[in-house]
């Protein structure tokens, strides 16, 4: 009978040993999966950083190209220069051809159509 209990005890210990070994094996596999996931996340992060750097460089290059184009357009734009015809004109030549002294009726007729006669002001 003691041999039976001894064999039973050895069998139970063997079962507990197998369970412990399988748990250790499962823990080791789980740790390996975490390590692989960490490596994958590191690779993804490196790819994302590279993509962000490339996007920033492309945006910077486009901005520089745009600024150069604007500079070239501004540089090539003709500057407003006076022509000989504009230099000959004076402010006295740009007035109405009607004088106040000669014919006030004619001037009154000209500006009344524009609402400047003063008749419509309170």
Image (tube, helix red, strand yellow):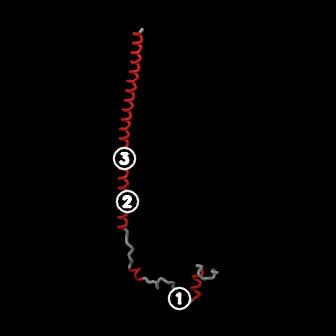
- Residue that sits furthest to the bottom in the current view: 101
- Residue that sits furthest to the right in the current view: 122
Q: Where is residue 115 drawn, in percent x and y?
A: 60, 79
Q: In this view, does 118 lie above or below 40?
A: below
Mark 2 secondary-structure assignment: helix
Q: Where is residue 98 drawn, in percent x and y?
A: 53, 86
Mark nearest the camera among 2 and 3 is: 3
Q: Is residue 74 above or below residue 85?
A: above
Q: Residue at image x 38%, y 21%?
A: 17
Relative horizontal placement of residue 19, taking residue 105 as reference (left or right): left
Q: Residue at image x 40%, y 18%?
A: 13
Give me the disc on residue 66.
2
Mark 3 secondary-structure assignment: helix
Mark nearest the camera among 1 and 3 is: 3
Q: How far apart are marks 1 and 3 (CA)?
A: 78 Å
Q: Distance between the residues labelled 2 and 3?
A: 26 Å
Identify the residue under disc 1. Answer: 99
Q: Is residue 56 above or below residue 17?
A: below
Q: Which of marks 2 and 3 is nearer the N terminus?
A: 3
Mark nearest the camera among 2 and 1 is: 2
Q: Which of marks 2 and 1 is nearer the N terminus?
A: 2
Q: Can you tell which quarter of the image residue 65 is in?
A: bottom left
């Amino acid at each position: 009978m003691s041999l039976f209990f001894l064999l039973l005890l050895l069998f139970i210990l063997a079962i507990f040993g197998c369970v412990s070994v399988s748990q250790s094996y499962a823990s080791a596999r789980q740790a390996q999966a975490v390590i692989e996931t960490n490596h994958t996340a590191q690779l993804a992060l490196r790819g994302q950083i590279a993509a962000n750097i490339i996007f920033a460089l492309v945006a910077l290059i486009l901005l520089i190209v745009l600024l150069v184009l604007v500079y070239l357009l501004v540089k090539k734009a003709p500057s407003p220069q006076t022509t000989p015809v504009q230099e000959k004109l004076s402010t006295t030549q740009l007035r109405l051809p009607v004088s106040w002294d000669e014919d006030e009726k004619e001037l009154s007729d000209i500006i009344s159509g524009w609402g400047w006669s003063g008749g419509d002001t309170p």
